[in-house]
Amino acid sequence: MPEAVLVKELQLLDDIEAIAEAYETKYGLPPCNISNWDPSKDSIELNLHATLPPIAGDGKNYIFSYTVSDQSGLRLALNYANDQWRSLISHSGSASIVVICNWLRAMGSKNILILGPRYFTVPHCLNAMGIGFETKHCKRTKDGYVLPDIFEEDDFDGIWVTNPIYGTGVYFSDNELTSLQQHWTSKNKFFVLDECLATFDRYIGPKLQPHPKTTIVAAPHKSICVNAYKFAISVFEKSQLEHFEHWSDVWLGCLPQSSHQAIEHFRGGGFLNYQSQFYDFISSSNIEFLNLTNFFSEADVDKNAFGYFRSVYFKDLSSDLGADKEFLRTAFFDTGAMFIPGNRNELDPNAGLSFRVNLAAFDTEARGAYLRLLHWLASKC
């Protein structure tokens, strides 16, 4: 009997968690995870419930994407003003990725070019749908990231782009992505844009031209580090609506009550209120983050980054160390800090060892752990 195929990115997390468990067994407490995906307890997550609307509905009936009222109004609130767009709501960005990969399969896609870094589920979903893929890394320079040379990729029938560049908070320019979409769709190729971590006032998706082979996914609550109350929306040209609605019952089923509440949170004033508080909070965290990082010439960060995920780079240390269990174990045990390496999401290996920091969880404990880690890594350069 063949062995089950596992997800390499989750195997790396299993290795990291095993090191953390060994650390806790020895010292009584786990190391501080500075790359955590959730906000810390002393952040403004405590104010979230004050901005959420009351629970709507009777709590017992199915809520399907295509029965949610005023979807055109929701798209407009997300800045999608062109009437040629249609949409499908799901409970998460990961779920939307699944339905988009199934759409690619149904439309005959055979080989997709993925721009890295990307969310870890994308290649696995493509593979599960029988679609080939290859990754090309966005190249990091002293001024930020630049697109690789991808305009003459005749071996691919589509491209998958993540904006902002995953884990960095660095956004592509409007011109870069609109030109990229125009180029690929002019050759009748697919263009998929994942903007799940983008704040909705920075979406580039609404500036793209609707096309039968273009689809975009957004998840506004991800941009404010809210994971329990959220929804995602896939946006596509209107001729594709029947496919997405039919297959939503297969891949998604119904929406949870939390997604319905998140939709109303976004359509009302609560989301904007919480977003304002959230970005004030992480602005203060960012000042602390930069003050600590700037003490170390060996460490580098991205200019003009925005959002709660920031990447830190040690260009004189190999990116391969991010997959070296012994190196990670020594780092965690020597510093009491744990991190998620950038190579897990296909970040440019030429940028050196990198990891992300969550500014929404950058409390006193995390700042101390981060400082110890910076000292330790700088000593290895």
Image (cartoon, rainbow, N blue to C red):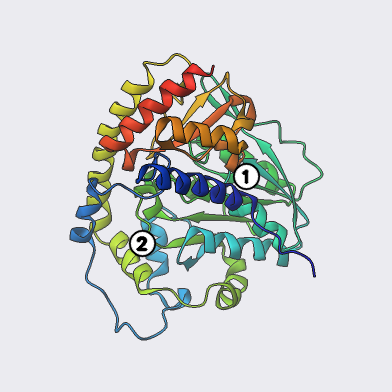
309 up-or-down from 318: above or below? below
Q: Image point 66% across, 56% down: which residue?
A: 124
Residue at 63% over, 30% down: 349
Please, is residue 375 above or below residue 41 in the view? above
Tell me what residue is drawn at x 51 percent, y 37 percent: 174
- From the viewer's side, name the closer residue of 9 and 84: 9
Q: Nearer the viewer, residue 375 or 93?
A: 375
Instruction: Classify mark 1: helix, strand or loop.
Output: helix
Tag 2, which secondary structure?
loop
Q: Position of residue 35 (x, y in %)?
A: 43, 41
User: Is 164 on the left-hand or right-hand side of 152?
Assistant: left
Up-down: is 43 above or below 106? above
Q: Which residue is mark 1?
A: 181
Residue at horizontal 71 percent and vertical 67 percent from the top:
106
Q: Position of residue 327 (x, y in %)?
A: 57, 32
State the image coordinates of residue 99 (x, y, percent, origin top left): 59, 65
Seen in the picture, residue 302 relative to 64 is either above or below; the reply is: above
> Disc number at residue 228?
2
Q: Where does the image place residue 213, in percent across and percent down from the top left? A: 66, 57
| Residue placed furthest toward the front | 26
Residue 113 visible in the displayed image: yes
Does the image show residue 170?
no
Q: Quadrant of the N terminus?
A: bottom right
Q: Of marks 1 and 2, which one's residue comes earlier in the chain? A: 1
The kind of residue on which mark 2 rests is: Ala
Q: Is residue 252 left or right of residue 153?
A: left
| Residue located farthest toward the top when viewing the structure as drawn | 297
Front residue of 192/61: it is 61
Nearer to the camera, 184 or 284? 284
| Mark 2 surroundings within 10 Å by alpha-carbon count, few (fewer than 14), some (14 through 19), many (20 or more) | few
